[in-house]
Image (spheres, grey):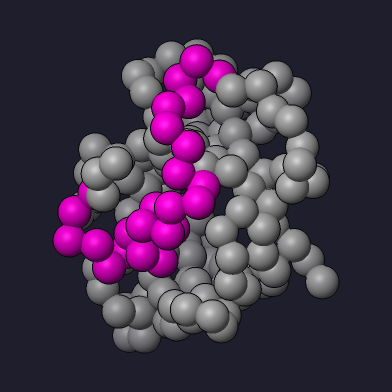
């Protein structure tokens, strides 16, 4: 079973831009189901590529199944089957200490939120934090994208 292991951090400042790998990718995503103890079903448009993702329960470690779908199908699912508001963000890949981080700059109702995540190969994997990594929010359910989509505003720590 495919497993996602990741840690999430709020981002401080702009220095992460100096280590960017290529341009930012525009994303829109919504949720068909936000599972509680069950599966979360997400639809995402990454540029012009559609992706359907099923995620199991959990925070730092959880099952994750990802499937490409036609962009037109993703557009239809986002428009007709996802409870709003959608998450809109720009994702930039950033290299730091032999790992690739993904920095998300949110727009829409979450404008001003900048969060970074790093995928790991082991739950106990040691990482070197970049200077722009602020508070860790991996264990805070309010910062899961499915919950952010329903939030009236950016959560405060």
Quarter assignment of residue 97: top right
Residue 72 in view here: no
In the rendered image, residue 155, in percent from the top left (x then y), is placed at 26, 49
Which quadrant is the N terminus positioned in? bottom right
Task: Describe residue 2's horizontal placement relative to residue 49 as left or right.
Answer: right
Q: Which residue is nearer to you in this view: 92 or 40? A: 40
Residue 21 in view here: yes
Q: Is residue 83 magenta?
A: no
20 to 80, vertically: above or below = above
Task: Describe residue 1's horizontal placement relative to residue 38 as left or right.
Answer: right
Which quadrant is the C terminus positioned in? top left
In magenta, the rendered stretch is: 130-154
Task: Identify the residue at image location x=50%, y=51%.
Answer: 139
Quarter assignment of residue 39: bottom right
83 to 24, vertically: above or below = below
In the rendered image, residue 100, in percent from the top left (x then y), is placed at 66, 32
Quarter assignment of residue 34: bottom left
């Amino acid at each position: 079973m495919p497993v996602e292991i990741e840690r999430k951090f709020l981002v401080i400042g702009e220095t992460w831009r100096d280590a960017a790998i290529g341009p930012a990718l525009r994303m829109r995503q919504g949720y068909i189901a936000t599972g509680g103890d069950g599966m979360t079903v997400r639809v995402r448009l990454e540029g012009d590529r559609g992706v359907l993702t099923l995620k199991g329960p959990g925070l730092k470690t959880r099952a994750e199944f990802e499937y490409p779908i036609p962009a037109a199908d993703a557009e239809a699912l986002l428009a007709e089957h996802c409870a709003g508001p959608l998450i809109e963000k720009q994702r930039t890949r950033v290299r730091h200490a032999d790992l690739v981080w993904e920095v998300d700059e949110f727009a829409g109702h979450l404008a001003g939120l900048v969060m970074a995540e790093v995928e790991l190969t082991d739950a106990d994997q040691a990482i070197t934090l970049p200077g722009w990594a602020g508070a860790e929010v991996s264990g805070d359910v309010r910062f899961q994208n499915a919950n952010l989509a329903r939030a009236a505003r950016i959560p405060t720590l």
